[in-house]
Amino acid sequence: MRRILVTGTAGFIGYHLARLLLAEGFRVHGYDGMTDYYDVALKRRRHAMLLQDPNFSATEGLLEDQALFDRVADDFAPEVIVHLAAQAGVRYSVENPRAYLDANVIGTFSVMEAARRLKVAHLMMASTSSVYGANEEMPFRETDKADHQLTIYAATKKANESMGHAWA
């Protein structure tokens, strides 16, 4: 059975991806910080539903805690890592920029280091349309320039994209 570690499994996309992977017969380990940016009770309900499947396990922890993430990754030994966790929210990043640097940049570094060390077959990451900044042409295309982010949130996600290209 293929083993996939998914970060952000208490979030909307991560929860639904984990459900799909479980339905397809994968073994999934979720990793989520359960931060209070939005309703923690909703996040806990999502994890409770996922935990009803014997092929799902989970860890609550922050990605910037590299020692914890490394232990989890070592114990689970994933073949694939899907990195969806992030401190989201454009406006909140203006008020709390450090939270974005810690979660999005340092946290993503932890994930990439674990993927490199474990030699996983694939590391997939999510970004955001916010990286396109002041681009006025709609819809955005992946080939559009993404040189001038307008918020710390967007800048951290662009930094993650750049780190991903450097690791590839």
Image (cartoon, rainbow, N blue to C red):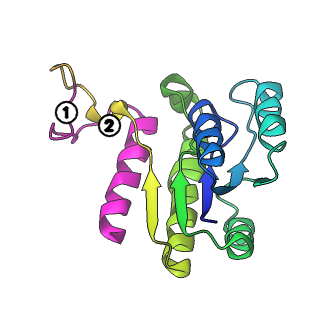
Where are the magenta residues, as a range? Answer: 140-168
Q: Residue drawn 51% across and 29% down?
A: 94
- Tag 2: amino acid: Val
Q: Quadrant of the N terminus?
A: bottom right
Q: In which quarter of the image is the C terminus?
A: bottom left
Q: Residue drawn 44% across and 44% down?
A: 126
Residue 54 lies, in percent from the top left, at 82, 52
Quadrant assignment, res 57:
bottom right
- Any magenta on residue 143? yes
Q: Residue drawn 34% across and 31% down?
A: 129
Q: Is mark 1 on a helix, strand or loop?
A: loop
Q: Is mark 2 on a helix, strand or loop?
A: helix
Residue position for label 2: 131
Callout 2: few (<14), some (14-19), or many (20+) C-alpha neighbours within 10 Å?
many
- Any magenta on residue 103? no
Residue position for label 1: 141
- Tag 1: amino acid: Arg
Query: How many numbered marks are there?
Result: 2
Callout 1: few (<14), some (14-19), or many (20+) C-alpha neighbours within 10 Å?
few
